[in-house]
Amino acid sequence: MKRIFSGIQPSGNLTLGNYLGAIRNWVALQQERSYDCIFCVVDQHAITVPQDPAVLRQATREVAAGMIASGIDPGDCILFNQSQVPEQAMLAWVFNCVARLGWLNRMTQFKERAGKNRDNATVGLYVYPVLMAADILAYKGTHVPVGDDQKQHLELSRDIAQAYNSMFGVDFFPLPEPQILGAATRVMSLRDGTKKMSKSDPSDMSRINMTDDADTIAQKIRRAKTDPEPLPSEVAGLEGRPEVRNLVGVYAALSDQSMDDVLSEFGGKGFGDFKKALSEVAVDVLGPIGAEMKRLSADPGYVDGVLAKGGSRARAIAGPIVAEVYDTVGFLRPNG
Ligand code: AQP
């Protein structure tokens, strides 16, 4: 059985990076109908950095609304928020006792996010990738569609699955495969082409939010950093121009073309026409999704109902898997 598991943190506004690197691919995979799909709003991951409780609740609903508005069908897939399924955190504890410090010490995202003040980072931020392994493996997930930034965490999930299997002499967990798909697997900040576009970047001008209106999208793209040279005619000409490469990649992804096609149209021209065309395609794609997100957000009862139902369906799968792990490990349980 092929089972997809993937998630998004409710740690801010959904961005174009989340859409192109993750959600859009999830919708396409759901439509292929060859996988069981489970999608999760990972609120327990979000609290690895401080969150205002009321804002977190609202962001959880908004991320769920973003997924539904983009085409995730909660009748077809399971859609829920992580904290409704305690089995994932239960499995994470076992995995904390399987994973090694040396493995976690190599995680580059922790180093980036903890920054210079590492002693002040939460323990949760450090063990975040262990919880991510538990999220996936509590469902025996086999495929994990993510953006390029999550590749290293996925490798750790595979290491944990393998280490658990060999520690207990079982063939229990699959080794989950990353699916890094599309032309924009790492969308970069509009202000700095060497930094990932991120929900939690303090500058709103660094990202396009999925709920931005047409004027805001156009303004952000107009002000996006470029350089004084015209666009190159070939992909090789993007070398050393990270901001330009990023905008060309985003245009290619949004318009379903290759970067070569984009450059054959805009190569040799200045950024005026290109940015105008990019704004138009971004508004065409995101406009209807943003409008639907706002409509769904006005009906929190509906979104909460979807998440509650998804949570019970998810528990029905994770419950027996994690119970078997607890037996294997040797935990004494009632009727065990
Ligand atoms: N810039 C990006 N380009 C492509 N894919 C991206 N993803 C995130 N940013 C980009 C993908 O979106 C999914 C959900 O990510 P997440 O919310 O779990 O965490 P993240 O990767 O840390 O995303 P952010 O937006 O940068 O959040 P914050 O600011 O809270 O850390 C993942 O599949 C991710 O690859």
Image (cartoon, rainbow, N blue to C red):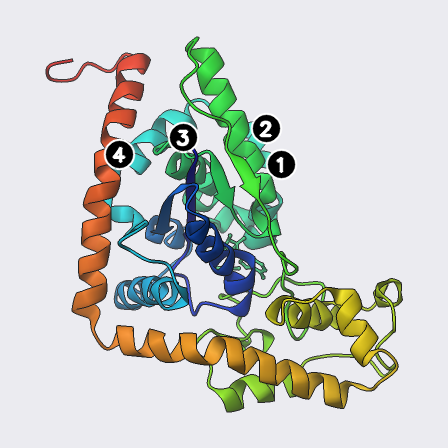
Q: Is residue 73 above or below residue 229?
A: above
As measured in the structure, the alpha-carbon distance from the residue carrying label 1 to the one carrying label 4 is 32 Å
The extreme top residue here reads 169
Residue at x 36% of width, y 64% of height = 63
Residue at x 19% of width, y 66% of height = 302
Q: What amino acid is at disc 2?
A: Gly
Q: Secondary structure at mark 2?
A: helix
Mark sitting earlier along the chain (3/4):
3
Q: On the image, which quarter does residue 190 sit in?
A: bottom right
Q: Residues within 10 Å of mark 3 (few under 14, many from 20)?
A: few
**Tag 2 near tag 3, CB within 8 Å:** no
Q: What amino acid is at disc 1?
A: Arg
Q: Residues within 10 Å of mark 2 (few under 14, many from 20)?
A: few
Q: What amino acid is at disc 3?
A: Met
Mark sitting earlier along the chain (3/1):
3
Kindly identify which residue carries mark 3. Answer: 1
Q: Position of residue 115 (x, y in %)?
A: 59, 54
Identify the mark at residue 102; answer none if there is no mark.
Answer: 2
User: Would you say the beta carbon of the disc 3 residue lies within 8 angstroms of ligand 1?
Assistant: no
**Tag 1 near tag 2, CB within 8 Å:** yes
As measured in the structure, the alpha-carbon distance from the residue carrying label 4 to the one carrying label 2 is 32 Å
Identify the mark at residue 106; answer none if there is no mark.
Answer: 1
Q: Is residue 74 left or right of residue 185?
A: left
